[in-house]
Image (cartoon, rainbow, N blue to C red):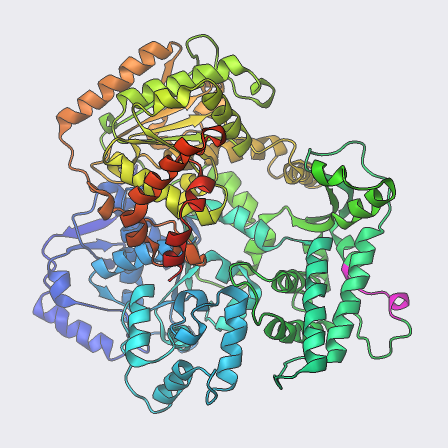
Amino acid sequence: MQKPNIQYEPDSTQSQPAKKREKKLLTKQYNPHVSYDPKKAKGHHKYTILGTQCYFPYQAYDLQQEFMTKVVQACQQGENALLESPTGTGKTLALLTSILGWVRSERTVEAHDDELPPKIIYCSRTHSQLNQVIKELKATAYKPRMVLVGSRDQMCVNPKLSEYRGAVLNSQCKKAIKNPTKLSGCQYESNLNRKLKNNIDIPFKMFDIEELHTLGERHKICPFYLQRHRISEADVLLMPYNYIFSSSVSRSLDIQFENSIIIFDEGHNIPKVCEEASSFEISIGQISEIQGKLNILKKKMMSNDTHEEFESDLTKVDNFKFLLTIISERIKNWEQEPIQKPIDQEKRIIRIFTGDKIYNFLFCKRETYEGRPDFRPLVPKHFSYWLKVIDDLLVDTTVGEDSKRTPQLKNFYDCLKKLIGIYTHDNDAIESQKDINHYYSVLIEEKIEEHILKKLKKHEIEPRKKSNRKIGFWCFNPAVGFNKIMKLSPRSIILTSGTLNPMDEFAQELGTDFNIRLENPHVIQKQQVQVSILKNGPNTRFNFKYENRKSTEMMLDLLNVITDICRVTPGGVLVFFPSYQLMKSVIKICEEQKIDKKIEKYKSFYEEPRQSAHYPYVISAYYNDVYSKGSLMFGVCRGKIAEGLDFSDDAARAVIVVGVPYPMKIDPKTILKEKYLDNIRKIKKKGVSSKHWYQTQATRATNQAIGRVIRHSNDYGNIILIDERYENPENKSAVSAWLRDQIKVFSNSELAIQQYQQFYEDMKKLDLKPKVQAVTELELDDIDENDDHFKGVKDQIIEDASKIKAKAIKKQKLEKKRKSRVRYAGGIAKESQKITTVLKK
């Protein structure tokens, strides 16, 4: 590794001439917000990186200095960067200090009149992750004007609206603002406007969500609109990915993207985020539910005993219902030759079209609305009209709506906005056609459940099948979404994660040059981690490819090995499977053969839930047992647990990956993605091959899962890859660089267990100080703030975890036939309805 151009000064006190020079330069600043705290900086370490002074709270590791060098280089040269550094190497702090140091240095020199000051836009996956970034930011010596951008769900403090969420809250908020003097009006927003108009001082600090709530309640102002107002003044903006990839959201925020530095933390998910942000599905069931809501609204309008004011009117309701009927009938009656065989057991793609055929399903032809002179068809010249109609209907139909789920009208509205955005493409027809070539339109007919099918009469089956149809508009080129970011004209885009390799393919997927790259090692000593491939169980070879998954003997071997690993491993053990189906199969055999009872001698046994409402109960109970008996968690690669939860120290002393987590070969999106990639290579004679893409998906999922085990410099853990295919060169070489040369291969499971036991005995002798020693010190950083169950949940679920578990155990004894064990999220949730009510508050 080339030594970075860094000058290190442990004593950060400036000389008197330097202070005078700085003061003189500050008078020339046109936006001098990135100040720093001299007293705080005095205790920090100063590094001069490529001419930029950066204050770091501690003495930086060599790899942190290298990371900072790459960040400053990207900013200075206006280049994009891919920076890979393992979890626990302090990359967030290195990123913040270096980029703030550079922005500060930029703003202390005389700027060109035509150049906008660089703004930092920091994006991560969730608000909880952004709260961690704020903690790191507060630890630096810098004092930028920082704005956390969030939704009303996170920031509304009006008690009259506290019961609402999502689209329902948005609609109620708009109504309340429109009539501030009424009983249902919002005084918080009107108070904010009054204070802003009269220049009444409101504190401008680095507030996290909780602190914004406190600010709003104390000053009786709206944090949501306060943050919106401050966007133009901010040096640093923090927001989730979806805000920047949604064109309508980013436009509404009115952010200055030109000459900005856009950072994507945990950026390994960006290709998938780009594809999903550009894709959608519309089902017959969704349309039927919207029509039902419109019928209720129509009745209210016609009677209107309460003299309620509506945003829309009867004509708009009738016209929108008619539009939905046209779309619904077109999906139901699009009769074409079906493909040769079903793609999977749950859904059947009955037709695949080129992307532009989506217009045939959603846009109106004249013959469909003849005889309705007041009807405006869904065609380009009426796009803005229909968006306004649906926006008004959203306000009218969400009154009394269940706020825990997004209204189907909102989902339809989002789909329509995506399609209109692609079709118009800033009125550039050529670009629109280029984008549409990266899509497939698919007509899907979902399988009718067996118990429903038995009740249907023969003549009812075909209409019911058609009612189970949906139209999918799937994007298979992440560059379509990422190109929208590039068109915002940022100075640099920096993607950072622990798993970005292979970088050449990553850059190709996004269709962007990343000329600055880094693949960092870890800060830990090699002896703190053990990584191995386990090829065999006691009786069978481990190979979990799809056709082998019905082997009961192999599953039993796996469970016996996991039991032995639990016996020798302290604290928590995480086991990741390629899919929920395989995980469920293993659990079923585990119960039938009563191996779960053997496991529970050593660890409490939990399963990652599929339903988000059950998630906090299960994960908190797991954490609670880690620090007493020890815990075992079964989860899936690419799931919540594998992607971002903090398992410091005893929370995960071993991570096991069972099988190679390739995407499901029979999944329709996998099939079409491979077809798309092969077509592109055939036409352009370049690009990522479907085979290479398929391998890379497994690589990234594996590396992301094993990244749970080491979270800081004093952590240690054991990584076990259970499948003989990991010994293949393409799999072995794809393991993260910091682990690659340490891989051991075991053909004998008994010998492997002995080695694992010895590893933990050796770690005890090192006397490494853990960062987390009790459940109360944990950061439950993957809780989704959009879910009512997760609002302020940490303290409550830790306190009640033992009660939840005790109730579930009691039910288990009373209902042995149901085998309602603690690890089942459903059982826990059913036993915890009273606690759920508390958590909602």
| Image location of residue 784, percent across then percent down | 42, 54
Magenta stretch encompasses residue 363: yes
Where is the N terminus found, in terms of image quarters? top left
Task: Give the magenta part as a residue range.
Answer: 362-369
Q: Is residue 306 above or below residue 17?
A: below
Where is the C terminus found, in terms of image quarters? bottom left
Q: Is residue 1 visible?
A: yes
State left or right for residue 473 relative to residue 732.
right
Which of the pair 649/626 is nearer the observer? Answer: 626
- Quadrant for residue 748, please give it: top left
Q: Is residue 779 visible?
A: no
- Quadrant for residue 312, please give it: bottom right
Which of the pair 25/552 is nearer the observer? Answer: 552
Which of the pair 489/653 is nearer the observer? Answer: 653
The total of numbered circles placed on residues is 0
Q: Residue at x 48, y 88 (%)?
A: 182
| Image location of residue 179, percent across then percent down | 51, 86
| Image location of residue 7, percent across then percent down | 19, 51
Q: Residue at x 22, y 23 (%)?
A: 760
